[in-house]
Amino acid sequence: MVASPIFGLWSNHRPCREPLVCSIFINLSANIYYAYAYLPSTSNKVHILMSRAFVGFGAGNVAVVRSYVAGATTLKERTGAMANMSASQALGFILGPALQACLSFLGENGVTVAILRLRLNMYTAPAFLAAAFGVVNILLVLLVLREHHIDDHGRCIRAINYTSEDREEISEETEEAIDQVAVLTSNFLFFVVMFIFAVFETIATPLSMDMFAWTRRQAVFYNGIIIICCIGFESILVFLVVKVASKRFGDRPILLTGLIIILCGFFILLPWGNRYPKIQWADIKNNSFVNGIQQDTKFSNSSLEPTGCPPEQTWCQYTPAIHLAQYFTSDVLIGVGYPACNVMSYTLYSKILGPRPQGVYMGWLTASGSGARTLGPVFVSQIYTILGPRWAFSLICSMVVAAITLLSCLYRRLIAFSARHRNVTE
């Protein structure tokens, strides 16, 4: 959230290879730092936390990548290029956990290399693998990537780090001509889309444990299959369909359709009927026993994980249970709506900004998405845990309705920069 505007500003005034190499090197170093976090005799948790913070800082190069793609494609090519980038990102989310699972054969002890003071096990091996991929990425950026900047018509213009009087005049004109209302609207829509998915991703495990009486291990395993495998591959298919559909229907209709599908997905999740979730009554009974009996009971049940809705969540006693069919149907709908809205929101955003360098603006867009992913788990921990799924999903539906209303009201303003100035027709 902090790094994206910084790297974006850097890419506006210098070749994009510089912030890309720097950010990848930070990410690479942070993964190595994480792998060696066990060496200090004290404060190992602090070192792990710092290493992950640096990994997150290095991930701020997403703004630079989106800015580069926006500046290297025409309006007709933009949606397809952005969809390909999103599909590659989704594939990475799928293969990442799969590669980590493949390295689990090393076990907790693993292999030790005394000369390097290196402990290669199931926890450190993925970090070293990520560092190796970082080296490959740096080589690709330095040897393959070339600066390429064109306008919406496809005409080549000066490199980003080239400055002259003519370029300064063009930048001032495009800066004044950008529709700031459309920019703010696009940032809000992107925030809503990312917030919704963050909530959906975070709430999956506690919701399934409360409603279906799954153990934590079962919830993590089944939701991992649903989110990573099913929704992940579903997202890739949606990205490919979006490339074709956008040419026929345009970006705004697809974005609006995606929001409506998401609304349907969360509306289906609202609790209905007369069946209530299983409650962990055993724990309540244990608390009523005398101290000696209570200790014996807890000791005898220590090997079993209590399942069902915790008694501390009072809404479990009067809120109907969500059926498994509701849950699966909602997963499918959100798995269709989210990727469509995701790629369309920042594709449309790049078109609104026009041919000027987009690093800073893309940085703010990425920061808004990071903020949404930060607030999502907070929403789950406060609203869902205290008030239950009916309040949580009702608020989400209200947020999506607000986004649909805003998009509908400002529909005519969310157009490409060149179309707005009558240079080309959308």
Image (cartoon, rainbow, N blue to C red):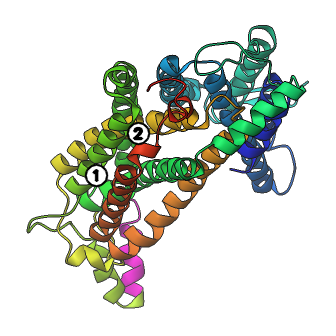
Which of these two is toward me, 328 or 303? Answer: 328
Q: Which mark is residue 289?
A: none
Q: Secondary structure at mark 2?
A: helix
Label 1: element kind = helix
Taking the image as shown, residue 147 lies to the left or right of residue 418, namely right
Among numbered discs 2 and 1, the one appearing first in the sequence: 1
Q: Can residue 306 be seen by looking at this rendering?
A: no
Q: Residue furthest front?
A: 422
Residue 403 rendering spot, x and y as whole percentages: 39, 55
Who's the residue at 37% across and 39% down the image? 255
Q: Is residue 43 above or below residue 38?
A: below
Residue drawn at the location 40% of the way across and 30% of the way down: 232
**402 up-or-down from 136: above or below:** below
- Give the alpha-carbon distance from disc 2 to disc 1, as whole Å: 12 Å
Question: In the image, which residues are magenta?
Answer: 292-306
Q: Which residue is mark 1?
A: 263
| Residue kind at label 1, given as amino acid type | Leu
- At horizontal 52% and vertical 29% (from top left) the residue drawn is 422
Quadrant of the rendered image containing residue 375: bottom right
Is residue 301 one of those drawn in magenta?
yes
* Three-letter amino acid code of the residue under disc 2: Cys
Please state the total of marks drawn on the protein image: 2
Q: Is residue 87 visible?
A: yes
Q: Nearer the viewer, residue 182 or 365?
A: 182
Instruction: Describe residue 31's horizontal placement relative to residue 186 as left or right.
Output: right
Q: Count residues near mark 1 (Cα–Cα under 10 Å), then give few for <14, some for 14-19, many for 20+.
A: many
User: What is the number of the mark on residue 341?
Assistant: 2
Any magenta on residue 297? yes
Residue name at image x 28 percent, y 64 percent: 308
Where residue 111 appears, as percent x and y from the top left, is 73, 25
Q: Residue 12 in the image: x percent, y percent? A: 79, 33
